[in-house]
Amino acid sequence: MKTTDELHLLIRGMDRNEKGYFRKFSKLHSSRNGNYLKLFDCVASMKDYSDDQVRVYFKSEKFISRLNATKFYLKNMIVRALRNYYEEQEPYVGKLMALAETYIILKKGLHQTAVKKIMKEWQNCRADENFVFTLQWINLYQRLINSDDRIKELIESAPALYEEKQKITNRYIENAGFEFLRSKIVAAQTRESAKQPELLQQVLRNPLFNENKILLSNIARAQRTELLARVYSLLDEPEKGRRVLINMINWCDDPSNNYMPSPFNYYIMHNQLLNLIDGDEATEMAHLIEKCRKIITIKHNNLSAKEEYEIQANIYLHEMRMYYWLKKPAEMLKSGFKMERYFSKHGTKGEAQMILLLLMAFAYFALKKFDKTLERLNAMFSNEFGDRKDLLTEAYLLNIMVHLELKNYSIIKRQVNLAENFIRKNSSEASTELNLIKVFYKIAKATEARDKSAIGELALKLLKILSPKKLSERRYIADWIQGKLK
């Protein structure tokens, strides 16, 4: 029986860079690193964890008699190593560590050093509109003047400190309101499609979403823009989403406003805008992709490794989408190969890998490389990279089309049944997809019978099933239909 083990979950969740850092860390910080590294490598290699398997594997090792204790210390060592690793990689962890270091310095009576550190970090957090950490630095400053018996300074600074804390708290509450709205949007997405619009309209009526309301902070304005664009996208009103994003980007680019969001938040706005652009605006897509690329190349942009990875991965993804719209499958593959190498370097799996596989399948299908198309689709069906239902639905549709092109008439019926069963099981509102599959099967029968007249009629029927919007999104089907009509 499969068991859940925290050490196994921790190690299996580490990427290649984290594992490399831990190996170096353990050699520096443990006299028993040999045992810890042996156990680390063993657990990392196990798909399903079992204490019994570990005991059998290390039966001749002395430490195996203290397996639970060794696992406990190994887990703590990994967490310490990751803390050090992310102090360099993640700004949030770095800020936490700076607070901890200053607290220790203050506790040891090094007040002059503590004052310099507090003032520097306080001003930085205030400038970044990081309200939680700003409050922490104010609290630490109050602790300092209390502990240093600076009664006069304490009395004189009390009103100003109170006012500052009140301002920061109000800004924090405002941002907490947007986080609450974010959770309501996520909750609306999980509801049935028929109820989604009503729930999203309720979110839109919240006073924070009133575009005439003056917000207390720039970061709140950025949050409002991001969430409004997301809601409009879900409501299938992309023009409204684009309007709020373009207004915000123009506002950020205006030097007279004296405001520039963090590089990652600036990228998020551009990425959202890219997601709302359709195939008729490939030139605009190229312009926005280039702006995202510049965010990475600017030195000293304070991006964490995780943020830089996300930006670069999405650049490749949007490049593939752009070439998809432009009907340039060869260029699409070139971007796909870059993305594959990038994912391999970072050990990427999950949803991003599924999207890449599907886009690569589209490109190979357009180039009539059907064996390569099936390779990518079968990788998706393995469930190794996740189970996003919308992506798998497209994969099932494309799979039937590939077998039609390969004239695999003997297995078409089975492929149709697999697709129908999957779609019925995972979607209560998939009449379009089920109708498409039925027509695909009829086309297979007509093609096998060499009935060109029937094939043409069925191709026209496919066009009627797909709305103009869906036909635009499913360009691979539209192009295939055009081929059948020739």
Image (spheres, helix red, strand yellow):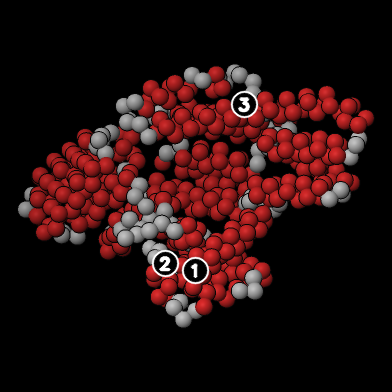
Nearer mark to the viewer, of 3 and 1: 1
Whole-Å distance between the Cαs marked 2 and 1? 8 Å
Identify residue type, mark 3.
Glu
Identify residue type, mark 1.
Leu
Please provide percent x and percent y for residue 331.
43, 57
Label 3 sits on a secondary structure element that is: helix
Residue 150: assigned label: none
Whole-Å distance between the Cαs marked 3 and 1? 49 Å
Please provide percent x and percent y for residue 177.
57, 27
Q: For this rendering, which residue is in front, 390 or 73? A: 73
Crowdedness near tag 2: few (<14), some (14–19) or many (≥20) residues, C-alpha within 10 Å: few
Q: Residue 130 is drawn in which quadrant?
A: top right
Q: For this rendering, which residue is in front, 131 or 3? A: 3
* Residue 334 makes an appearance in the image: no
The residue that appears at 78% across and 50% down in the rendered structure is: 104
The residue that appears at 89% across and 40% down in the rendered structure is: 148
Residue for badge 2: 51
The residue that appears at 44% across and 21% down in the rendered structure is: 202
Whether residue 372 is situated above or below residue 398 in the rendered picture = below
3 or 1: tag closer to the N-terminus? 1
Residue 67: assigned label: 1
Looking at the image, how many numbered discs can be counted on the residues?
A: 3
Whole-Å distance between the Cαs marked 3 and 2? 49 Å
Label 2 sits on a secondary structure element that is: helix
Nearer mark to the viewer, of 3 and 2: 2
3 or 2: tag closer to the N-terminus? 2
Residue for badge 3: 174
